[in-house]
Image (tube, rainbow, N blue to C red):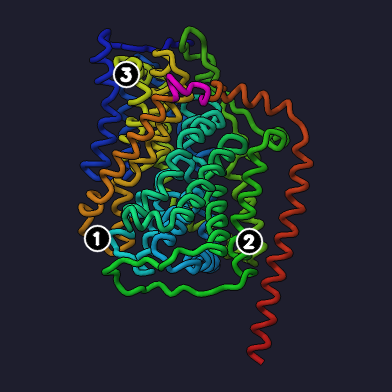
Amino acid sequence: MTWTQAINPLGNPGLSALVDALPIIFLFCALAIWRMKGYIAGLITLSLALVLAIVVHGMPANMAFLTALYGAMVGLFPIGWIVVTAVFLYNLTVKTGQFEIIKDSIASITEDRRLQALLIAFSFGAFLEGAAGFGTPVAITAAMLAGLGFNPLYAAGICLIANTAPVAFGGIGIPIITAGAVTGIDAMAISQMVGRQLPFLSVFVPFWLVFIMAGWRGAMEVMPAILVSGVSFAVAQWFSSNYMTPMLPDILSSLVSIVALVFLLRVWKPKKVWRFADEPQATLKVKKHSAGAVLKAWSPFIVLTVLISDWGLKPVKAVLDTVSIKIVFSGLDQAIIAGGKPMSVVYNFNWLSAGGTAILISAIISAMILRIGPGQFLEVFARTLKDLRFALLTIASVLGFAFVANWSGMTPTLGKAFTVTGSFFPFVAPILGWLGVVITGSDTSSNALFCKMQQITAEQIGVNPVLTVAANSSGGVAGKMISPQSIAVGAAATGLVGREGDLFRFTLAHSIFFALIISMITYLQAYVLTWMIPPLTMASTAAATAKAVSGGTTILMVTGIFIVILGLVASRQRSSLDALNGRRSA
């Protein structure tokens, strides 16, 4: 039995688009107006999409429910798997107290508030966005700045504004991976395009943060630090997103930026230490730690960076994919006719080459380095699963909705409606992503909702869809700072509960300004700087290319040797500390 995808089912493009937009409109209202819990809103949205797919588009019920199941499976693996393991690794460092050493190692570098904003809000915030996401960056960095003596409103506002350029690659690249999952475009191609948009913003954001705090003169006084912070971050972001993997840009860029700024401060200092005129008493006690202790604390994320780098290499992926499991959806495979040809629906359970597995292996190695027992390891993992159970349900329901909308014909119908913008659409594309993040609070959710529509609209107007799909993610980063969830986290972290309106007004103009910057960049890339757009590569093509590459085993062996050496160094540091404590006790 086959079924042909129905586009414009009501015979009127405007009316069909309006009806097909109802689930998205409901989701926006549920989250922004009714403040419904994410997983409940997601499940209802999925239910509405199923009704429209069956009743309006005429999709057979069994195909509609199988499509929802397929989307939910993609949501849980590989996307949810990365979320769980990333947060788990972060929780391990918190549980063992190593994260406090990481925080101290950043906060103790300088007392100048401008430089603290660059190090903590911008660079360290990006690191947290890449390693954990889910509001963690703003919650931790805003609390740190407030504890150091920042005005609470500035502490929260600065961290919200800083948490822009990293968002597209947050949570080990989840937004980019999601965009690839719903469009079929190779995630690496999307990563490359985002990596040719956001670095322009990454160079600008450090200057803008200091300018907001200290004005033009204050920014000029620390211009060397601004340039080193922004340029080093942008270059690493461009390189890692274009030549490594979409899972790595945030972590690598933030570490490069931190190290570059630390080295600069060894040879250069601002003429005077700048502080707020009316800043409150500092409450955060910053401790000094030895270089060995700092290395040990950072070691889980060093291991993570190395393994994620390996997992993103084609030779390594070719080796790891030899044990993948292919599940053919018999009720869907070759049953849906889209674009005049049947769709192949095969679920790829690449359990070993998945990014989440690399993170889990990093967590196991880190547990050995930090001497975490099996009981504590499993306890933290169980608690992480419990804490994320509703987030996983939200991801599964949103991805289920995305696939139902895509395969039933709802998304193509909406895409055709957006062709009325004509050649102006590349300017509009980032604004759609911005709107999606403002409402949902998630670049991942925004990509799941809009990226397929971005792809179809671009194809209709003759623009490379890689550009508009990437623009959805790039534009979305500017919406993060004013989303209700982010505002609530920032207010709670700095004692501004009840003053969320002040924080929203503080960030609103900056959010719109950043979104317009991305829109102008995208428009220029569509028609003037077309050489910046990477070739359109579909995921199936990329996978086939990867299988033809060999040499991954050697890379994994070299990585293993490096990790053993790192583990021995960190263990030696632990032994030295134990011996020192023993002598003190004697």
Residue at 36 percent of width and 49 percent of height: 208
Gap between marks 1 and 3 measured at Cα: 39 Å
- Look at the numbered disc 1 and give the secondary structure of its residue: loop
Q: Let me know if residue 557 appears in the view.
A: yes
Name the front one of labels 3 and 2: 3
* Circles 1 and 3 in contact, beta carbons < 8 Å: no
Is the residue 512 above or below the residue 382 in the image? above
Specify which label sits upstream in the sequence, 3 or 2: 2
> What residue would you read off at disc 1?
497
Gap between marks 1 and 2 measured at Cα: 37 Å
User: Most prominent secondary structure in the magenta stretch?
Assistant: helix
Is the residue 111 above or below the residue 247 in the image? below
The dot on residue 418 is: 3
Specify which label sits upstream in the sequence, 1 or 2: 2
Residue at 55 percent of width and 59 percent of height: 264
Residue at 47 percent of width and 58 percent of height: 119
* Circles 1 and 2 in contact, beta carbons < 8 Å: no
The dot on residue 367 is: 2
Q: Which residues are magenta?
A: 525-533
- Look at the numbered disc 3 and give the secondary structure of its residue: helix
Instruction: Give the side of residue 386 with respect to residue 374, left or right.
Output: left
Q: Quadrant of the C terminus?
A: bottom right
Determine the image quadrant of residue 63: top left
Q: Is residue 529 magenta?
A: yes
Specify which label sits upstream in the sequence, 1 or 3: 3
Point out residue 580 in the picture as x, y percentages from the top left corner: 67, 82
Point out residue 23 in the picture as x, y percentages from the top left corner: 29, 29
